[in-house]
Amino acid sequence: MIETSGCNKQDEIWAQDFFEPGYMSIPGSNGPVSIHIMIRSAQDYRSAGRKVFQDLRSNTVGAVQHLAGGVTTDSTGNLETVPPYKHNKKSYPAGRAVMGSAGKRPFMMDFLDAQETQAPIELDTSWLAVQHTDEFMQFLPVESERGWVMMVDDPRAGLEILQKAQQDGHGKEMAVSRSKSPTDRAKWRVTNTIDELLNVTNFAGFQESCAGHIEENINIIKRETGITDAEIIRIPSLYQVYKSKVWQYAGNKPRTDEEIQTIFSDIWQSGNGKQRRQVHDLVHAQTTRRLGEQQGQQLAKDSEKDGSVGWHDALEAGTPPQELKNYQPETATARSLEGRQEQGNGPAVALYPGTINSVVLNNKQILAPNPWGPVIEGQDVLAAAVNAAYQKANYTVLYMDDWFTHHEKVGEVHCGSNAIRELPAVKWW
């Protein structure tokens, strides 16, 4: 466990972004001799990066840094790896690194080039606000001739799911099915219906624009690896313009004490035993709700005391302080938001929690953010589609709620976690 509470607040919840677990290996008499190496992101202002030396480095784990004043694309959530493959008479037994850029090559790619083993592939992530590859793509090991598949977001499929629900007469259903958590803020419930969501200015056009950018990056991976469409699995997803605030929030309207007392008196005087039991349950539920709210309010107060409510979103956390001082995303976005939404040219972030931004577990399971899609005929239609997509690769999905902890801060489960894998026995040489 890495304790980041003493670091800059912007780093505390973005464990994927300030370091990447790697390894080094050399030939040995019984096979490769390997050691874990923790790679600090090329962002010298991220104090949490020092933790790879303070907490992770040991007599069995090394640590390196390629320090620079990198921006968001130098966050290591932007660093992925294509599994080993052969293509065009070239072999990559250790796979290849993948990073996105936005007009400027990340500093980290110089470090990767210098290793001379994983010839990095550069993608275009300029269409995304956070500009990280893990926002729309993922590689999974499978049992096949190639040994892996590529998972990619599909905004067109996500749009079709909502449109079908509307066409089938479910347009008045809630677009988000998330239930309340005891620690939620006062306004926690998304009130948009499917009809209202689909009526957002150029909603369909923006999904098409994002889909086009994703296809351009898929074509790069196809060209570099030889992967075919049959080895690409698409996951329904949806996007919105950064800071556009598509979701509208409201709170509950619980019964007042007076309403509870009136119901209690009327039923208790004239009701039978079953009805009296219902009154008892109602009073108990009201008490439980009140205690839960008090607990949540106390947690919120505690968070405010230690400053955690000031956590930066994933983009702001990856922006150098000297630039962040003059960075006003709310103002900058507000000036041209409507025009950019109409033109469909971003910057984009996930609308629903991005399930592809997940952690691959060892037992053919995916730990993903719960999308909380519309519930139609008793089924979350987005989650069902995501399950079906991963099932094509023989993976099952475990869901967790990250709506307020990470999703609202334009990151997801993968962004907020990190995993140190078993050392491979690959003879990369």
Image (tube, rainbow, N blue to C red):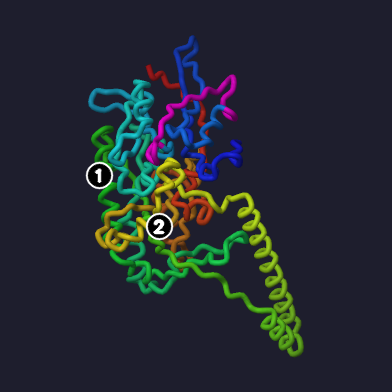
Residue under the point 30% across and 32% down: 121
Which of the numbered marks, if any, corresponds to residue 260? none
| Residue 426 image-quadrant placement | top left
As helix, strand or loop, the secondary structure at mark 1 comes to helix
| Residue 300 image-quadrant placement | bottom right
Point out the frontmost of discs 2 and 1: 2
Is 52 a magenta residue? no
Q: Quadrant of the N terminus?
A: top right
In the rendered image, the vertical position of residue 377 relative to residue 64, given as above or below = below
Q: Can residue 20 be seen in the rendering of this structure?
A: yes
Give, as a three-letter code, the residue at label 2.
Glu
Mark 1 Cα shell of 10 Å, populated few (<14), some (14-19), many (≥20): few
Picture coordinates of residue 125, whole percent (x, y): 32, 43
Residue under the point 46% across and 64% down: 176
Residue under the point 50% across and 51% down: 406
Is 67 a magenta residue? yes
| Residue 107 image-quadrant placement | top left
Residue 170 appears left or right of 419: left
Mark 2 Cα shell of 10 Å, populated few (<14), some (14-19), many (≥20): few
Q: Report the magenta residues as a range.
A: 54-74
Which residue is disc 2 drawn over? Answer: 330
In the rendered image, the vertical position of residue 136 relative to residue 271, given as above or below = above
Furthest residue in direction top, as rendered: 29
Q: Quadrant of the C terminus?
A: top left
Picture coordinates of residue 111, whole percent (x, y): 38, 25
Which residue is disc 1 drawn over? Answer: 216
- Return the residue nearer the eye: 181 or 373: 181
Give, as a three-letter code, the residue at label 1.
Glu
Furthest residue in direction bottom, as rendered: 270
